[in-house]
Amino acid sequence: MAVSPRLLLLCAVVLCAISMGLRQSFGLFLGPMTAFHGWTASAFALAIAMQVLLNGVAQPICGNVADRFGGRTVLWGGWVLYAIGLAIMAAAASLAMFYVGASLVLGIAVSAAGFPIVMAGLSRLLPPEMRGRATGLVTAGSSFGQFSVVPIVQAGIDLLGWRGALFAMAGVAILAMPLALPLADRPAPKHEGRPQAAGAALKEALSTSHFWCLFFGFFVCGVHVSFLTVHLPGFVASCGLHPSWGATSISIIGLFNIMGAMLSGELSGRWRRRELLVFIYAARGVVMTLFFLGPKNETTLVMFSAAMGFLWLSTVPPTVALVARRFGTQWLATIFGLVFLGHQIGGFMGASLAGFIWDRTGSYDQMWVIAILAGAFAALVNLPVKDPRTPVPARA
């Protein structure tokens, strides 16, 4: 039975909101968990960085399974693993067991339950004229989860303690599973698919500069997102601001990316997607430079969070559109999963390198400089991307 586009979008948006909200809350546990267990900040950050890296490695695998058998089954498996990983984090008495839950189990879980699987399914279920807007809405839903769920998790930590909050998050993961019911996507329509075997499609993608430009641009996006998600609360505290401003800043980023993602989704269907990506990455570098060089107080933190939030996940709609237009939708989850691997490798670098720099220097200054230069690199590396006005036909 056909499912209405509105119901598909509603379920997709709520799923991504919950997934992103839970995932972006992990940085809130750095302080209380390291204080309780006596772990270093770099040890905690490395666990989250390994989660991000495994997420990237597992994403094309989960995407390929979704391309072959449908996204709903993959999403269900992801939410079960989400609950298991969070429960292991809560119960872990040793750093090794914490790594099993936070890095191994949750690394796979966030791949299977994440927005690449949802968006690839929507791209097959919705007509082409709705895809740009749908991608923007789903991305905005992810940002709304960051805005709404992160403060709730912080309140849960204050009320239940960090361990109780993690168990509550595991319960939410189980309750999210029915939302995947309508997302039983079908194979790509023949008139727009690229009739290739998976191996041939991957070989073609990996042999093009188009793919690698998007890959390295998304690598920088991962550096920025993981650095700020994991370390912005600690940076805020190091500047003498109340720790609650860390959660507030992440929440503001999520709030403003709702608007940024929706605008990016609309522009991805109206404007040249390459120029949009170049602008977003260059603007990130400018915003971080102004914040790094300026005073650190509540006002400048709010201004930075709002500006950075507007650019936060706005890279996703044009990136998905460029992958779909160049390589088709038949293996979209697989190929975009490989591009997303670049994002997660960057995320690993952003989270772990920032923790290492903090432990060695007691300051995040060097990491801010690296993040600013990375933004300039991402803007430049996307300049050669080819942005076809119509999808490229399949090769014989």
Image (cartoon, rainbow, N blue to C red):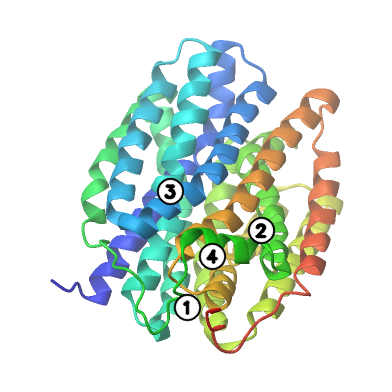
Q: Which one is in front in this view, the residue at disc 1 or the one at disc 3? A: 3
Q: Judge from the rendering whether residue 260 lies leftward or rightward of residue 369; answer left or right.
A: left
Residue at mark 3: 62
* Amino acid residing under circle 2: Phe
Distance, label 2 to label 3, CA atoms, is: 19 Å
Residue contact at pointers 2 and 3, CB within 8 angstroms: no
Question: Which residue type does callout 3 highlight?
Answer: Cys
Q: Residues within 10 Å of mark 3 (few under 14, many from 20)?
A: many
- The residue tagged 2 is 218
**Residue at (66% x, 64% y) in the render:** 307
Sequence-earlier tag: 4 or 2 = 4
Query: Observer-nearest residue: 192 or 166?
Result: 192
Q: Residue at x 51, y 76 (%)?
A: 265
Circle nearer the N terminus (1, 2) = 1
Picture coordinates of residue 180, whole percent (x, y): 26, 55
**Secondary structure type for disc 1:** helix
Q: Name the residue under label 4.
A: 201
Residue where numbered disc 1 is placed:
132
| First-in-chain label (1 vs 4) | 1
- Element assignment for label 4: helix
How packed is label 1: few (under 14 Cα within 10 Å), some, or many (20 or more)? many
Residues at marks 1 and 2, CA–CA distance in whole angstroms:
18 Å
Left/right of residue 251 with respect to residue 118 in the rendered view: right
Q: Report whether residue 145 is seen.
A: no
Instruction: Quote the CA–CA distance across marks 1 and 4.
Output: 23 Å
